[in-house]
Image (cartoon, rainbow, N blue to C red):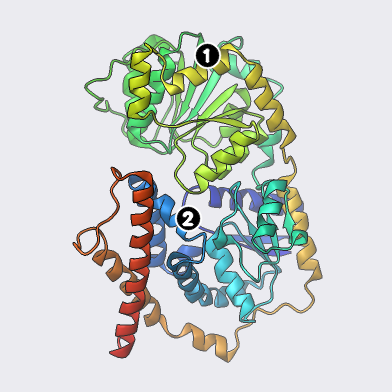
Amino acid sequence: MRVLILSAKTGGGHMRAAQALEEVIKDKDSQNEVITIDGLEYVNHYFNKAVVEGYKFSATKLPKMYGILYRASNQDSGTYKLVQRTNSHFAKKFVPLLADFRPDVIVSTHPFMSIMVSRLREKNITNIPLISIITDFAPHAAYINPCVSEYIVSSEQMVDALEELGVERSHVHPVGIPIPPIFFEHDEERDVHLKEMGFDPEKKTVLVMAGSFGVTDILKIYENLNDIDLDFQIIVITGRNQKLFNAFNTIINNTPEMRVGDIQVNFEVHDEPLRRDSKLRLTKATKLIYFTDEVHKYMHIADLIITKPGGLTVTESLASCLPMVLFRGIPGQETDNTEYLTANNLAVSIQKETTEDKLRNMLHEKKKSNVGETIYNLLKYPEKLRSMKESCSRLNNKDSAYNVYDIMKRAADEMTEPKYLMTPDDIELMTDEAEAERLIRDFEEVIRKYSGEDEEFALPDDNDGEYEFEDKGYRFIDMMYQNFKKIRAEHKKTGGG
């Protein structure tokens, strides 16, 4: 079987799911051929850059606005139409790849890839089965396309959700998001591993997956953990966040008796300037880890994980039967994930303290933060922790990647006359490279016009009330789309587009 997997790097989860599936495909049959491609980069470097950098910027710097964009693209709006139109335009770039590789099945782990391949199937350019993997715990309209053959989802609840969006239940498979099978393997030598790391097997261990947090946020979480009047130990994984690693390294080195082991990294480690008001007092033994490909090992030995609610990290935690404390999900898919996980007793959620929270705590002389109080209650009274662990085990989709493989194989076997050779009409579709450049140029023009510098309409402000912000946000998005169409029409009239 020849498998083409299309993904994208808007967040790490889409590519991780693709890589996990690729490993299983190769493991199932050495004769299988599989290639995994960053589809956005493949169709156009500048389009990829705009999408990936736009996602990173809006999700981290303008999370409220990102949430509005996410919701706007989840309904029949200008944003939804723009997403569909742009991706449909770039879909034709995959035609030579299909003709060259001749896949038996195509798998998408990103909604934009689903849009593109669905468009090719809709135009009868190819009829290769398309399997769409939804890498979160709630659906989004961008995933739902008319020519998707089968959908892979995380849970039974997602089957109902997709049916409400018009998808036939028989085409939705709640087998779980594919992750490496090693996350499902129970670690029989947990105590041995803890001792090797310099930890006490009798103490509770809290794992902090910190790479996605801002430096200030995660240092505050760590400070709260050290303020808790309980004896436990901490593992901090910073991922490839060098600034965050340096900051932790400085703090822990200032209290060397609390540092557990050392780590080698391939960059210059130096003291990171800390907040002037930081009065961080280390009371917990801490192991600091940079990037690691052994996340499964640390999940298996931990009793609790503090993380953001990204789809793949959540799935890996569920596979490891590891209860979660979710912190500050990005408005959109992460807050949707949080809602699902907390409703099903798989996690508890902590949001950033508001001014009202701080004032109330002062009046009632509370010393614990939201983070500290939540962790304290889970570790001091472990009934809730045990209950969450049991809930995780019930949702454990142990054979997720292998079940996805079986669905792919069945779809490929049912394909009788595959179509992936370029016709003269297809080749003509590929010739107008200038159109792609014009499309991106026009989009950039409307972004510049409405970047907040134009007095005609300003970006919503975080100080706006919730309803005022949302109303401004939707009007802003609609105005951007209307002006995008206007610019496109003017360029076509003048012969420039």
Disc 1: CA contacts within 10 A as few (<14), some (14-19) or many (>=20): some
Residue 227 found in image quarter: top left
Return the residue at label 2: 71
User: Counting residues from the N terminus, which is met first, the one under dot 1 or under dot 2?
Assistant: 2
Return the residue at label 1: 198
Identify the amino acid type marked 2. Arg
Identify the amino acid type marked 1. Gly
Relative to 290, does residue 92 appear above or below in the rendering? below
Q: Is residue 202 left or right of residue 237?
A: right
- Residue 272, position in %: x, y? 27, 28
Relative to 56, does residue 163 appear above or below in the rendering? below
Taking depth in this image into account, of 61 and 266 the one nearest to the observer is 61
Disc 2: CA contacts within 10 A as few (<14), some (14-19) or many (>=20): some
Relative to 185, does residue 96 appear above or below in the rendering? below
Residue 121 found in image quarter: bottom right
Taking depth in this image into account, of 13 and 361 the one nearest to the observer is 361
Give SS at disc 1.
loop
Image quadrant holding the N terminus, namely: bottom right
User: Is any part of residue 30 visible from this angle?
Assistant: no
Residue 479 found in image quarter: bottom left
- Residue 328, position in %: x, y? 44, 36
